Image (spheres, rainbow, N blue to C red):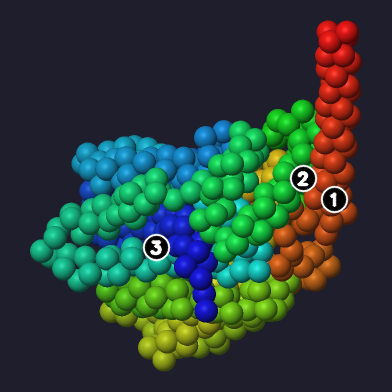
């Protein structure tokens, strides 16, 4: 039977995982907004004339997220705590929501400014969130809990797309509120997170690393571990690892970006995680999430139909991500990566083949689309793509990234690696609309090739991290066992202190004898 403390452990981890709703919602809200004629009219945009400008609106978010993730997310989470990093991100998201929803008529600059600010907020939250989850979760269920990090991305998309679908169905009544309602609901989850965060413990590893406060670390662990023996063992393990990292790795106990490149094993992990996070987006999911409406317009003419497909896609995404709960800590990270990449590659090979080998139907307006059976088959294949993506490169990329770095560099590394997703998106999505306009569905062959290459990369380069304690993962990459080395250093220090104490006691006894004489 699951203990109450284990249930509470799940609860605080899921509160942190709700930060991913912000990302999923925002990634989908722009896709939904650009499908609204009222949004285009409010900002005086034309989908054909202003392709680059519309791409800039999407890129503005990623620029803010990259800057925050690379330069502010790690230091904020390290200095002020994981909870503060998440809270500040939520506050900025709420402020940015108002900027976007109430941007003046034809003032696209205000809307873009809101997109930049929301990117900064999410860059902070998406750095602190996975670190917190990894640091409070026991190693035997860490993969299962981190699965919900990706699932909440799908929850964000689910909320955004169904709201967009409902608003589009009632756009005659709502007018310009059809897109405003979609944007305003973006602040719902951040408000919930801000209410819940103050009532849950800070990361025990942060207490020891930042303040060397063992008692607060034990207090936090007692809320989420079943026995005092577990608490004492974990605190001792954390202390030993941090002792080694402070003196031998970081140098003097200060976390800095230099430490990422000082240790060869850390550098290796950083570069591998960069590839995985870039690969996650170049698999095709990042582009599909932002431009699925544009892709579906080559198949369907009805905006309502496209919004319904997007909403159903987000719904299936939640269910598909749950598959990782059962397999992440059973078959391992490598298995999920390889099977997912091969499955996605096959889907991205079949979709353009179907598109090229079936005839077009010319509408009265001269627009070329596909017949309904062909359209349904293509949509099914894109849903199948999501089936492979969500539990593998969706969930497992975050799991692997959050667990492979040692405490002294974890915040900076996770922030940088997670934002490599946005670096890839910023570069690729600038020219994808043009790529799609000129090549149609044939552009998906690019994603086919990328996925097959990713499967090969994982096979040769990525080690298995399933159920390995955070403090001992360095050994998988040719590094030292921080726990063993830290234990030796702590024992040496304790022995030194004991010798000093014995020497002082002897001196005190001799002094007392002299006084007595």
- Could you say where residue 221 lies in the image, as x and y percent from the top left? 57, 53
Q: Earlier in the sequence, mark 3 or mark 2?
A: 3
In percent of the image, x 87 and y 35: which residue is there?
A: 495
- Marks 3/1 in contact by CB < 8 Å: the verdict is no
- Marks 3/2 in contact by CB < 8 Å: the verdict is no
Q: Is residue 390 above or below residue 221?
A: below
- Distance Cα–Cα, label 1 vs label 2: 7 Å
**Helix, strand, or loop for circle 2?**
helix
The residue carrying pointer 2 sits among few (fewer than 14), some (14 to 19) or many (20 or more) residues within 10 Å by Cα, namely many
Left or right: 383 with respect to 174? right
- Distance Cα–Cα, label 3 vs label 2: 39 Å
Mark nearer the viewer, 3 or 1: 1
Q: Is residue 480 visible?
A: yes
- Could you say where residue 62 lies in the image, as x and y percent from the top left? 50, 46
- Marks 1/2 in contact by CB < 8 Å: the verdict is yes
**Helix, strand, or loop for circle 1?**
helix
* Label 1 sits on residue: 484
Mark nearer the viewer, 3 or 2: 2
* Label 3 sits on residue: 156
């Amino acid at each position: 039977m699951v203990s109450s403390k284990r249930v509470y452990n799940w609860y605080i981890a899921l509160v942190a995982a709700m930060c991913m709703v912000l990302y999923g919602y925002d990634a989908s809200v722009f896709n939904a907004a650009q499908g609204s004629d009222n949004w285009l009219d409010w900002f005086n945009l034309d989908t054909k004339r202003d392709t680059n400008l519309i791409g800039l609106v999407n890129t503005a978010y990623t620029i803010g997220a990259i800057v925050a993730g690379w330069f502010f997310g790690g230091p904020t989470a390290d200095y002020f705590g994981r909870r503060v990093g998440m809270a500040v991100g939520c506050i900025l998201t709420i402020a940015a929501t108002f900027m976007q929803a109430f941007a003046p008529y034809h003032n696209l600059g205000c809307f873009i400014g809101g997109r930049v600010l929301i990117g900064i907020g999410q860059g902070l939250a998406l750095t602190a969130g996975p670190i917190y989850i990894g640091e409070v979760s026991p190693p035997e269920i860490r993969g299962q809990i981190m699965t919900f990090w990706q699932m909440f991305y799908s929850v964000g998309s689910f909320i955004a797309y169904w709201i967009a679908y409902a608003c589009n169905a009632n756009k005659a009544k709502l007018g310009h509120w059809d897109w405003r309602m979609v944007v305003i609901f973006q602040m719902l989850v951040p408000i919930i997170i801000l209410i819940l965060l103050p009532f849950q413990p800070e990361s025990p590893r942060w207490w020891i690393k930042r303040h060397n406060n063992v008692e607060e670390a034990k207090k936090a662990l007692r809320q989420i571990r079943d026995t005092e023996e577990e608490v004492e063992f974990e605190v001792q393990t954390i202390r030993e690892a941090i002792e080694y990292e402070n003196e031998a790795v970081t140098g003097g106990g200060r976390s800095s970006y230099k430490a990422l490149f000082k240790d060869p094993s850390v550098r290796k992990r950083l570069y591998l995680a960069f590839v995985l996070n870039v690969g996650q987006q170049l698999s095709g999911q990042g582009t599909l999430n932002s431009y699925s409406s544009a892709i579906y317009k080559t198949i369907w003419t009805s905006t309502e139909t496209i919004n319904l497909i997007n909403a159903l896609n987000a719904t299936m995404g939640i269910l598909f991500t749950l598959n990782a709960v059962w397999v992440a800590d059973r078959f391992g990270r490598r298995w999920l990566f390889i099977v997912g990449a091969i499955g996605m590659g096959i889907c991205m090979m079949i979709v353009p083949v179907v598109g090229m080998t079936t005839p077009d139907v010319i509408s009265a307006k001269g627009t070329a689309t596909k017949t309904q059976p062909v359209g349904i088959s293509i949509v099914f294949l894109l849903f199948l793509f999501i089936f492979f993506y969500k539990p593998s490169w969706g969930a497992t990329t975050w799991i692997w990234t959050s667990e492979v770095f040692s405490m002294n560099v974890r915040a900076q590394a996770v922030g940088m690696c997670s934002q490599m997703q946005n670096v890839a998106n910023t570069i690729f999505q600038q020219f994808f609309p043009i790529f799609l306009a000129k090549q149609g569905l044939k552009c998906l062959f690019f994603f086919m090739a990328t996925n097959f290459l990713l499967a090969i990369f994982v096979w040769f380069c990525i080690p298995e991290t399933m159920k390995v304690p955070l403090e001992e993962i360095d050994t998988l990459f040719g590094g030292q066992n921080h726990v063993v080395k830290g234990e030796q250093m702590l024992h040496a220090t304790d022995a030194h202190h004991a010798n000093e104490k014995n020497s002082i006691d002897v001196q005190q006894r001799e002094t007392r004898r002299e006084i007595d004489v």
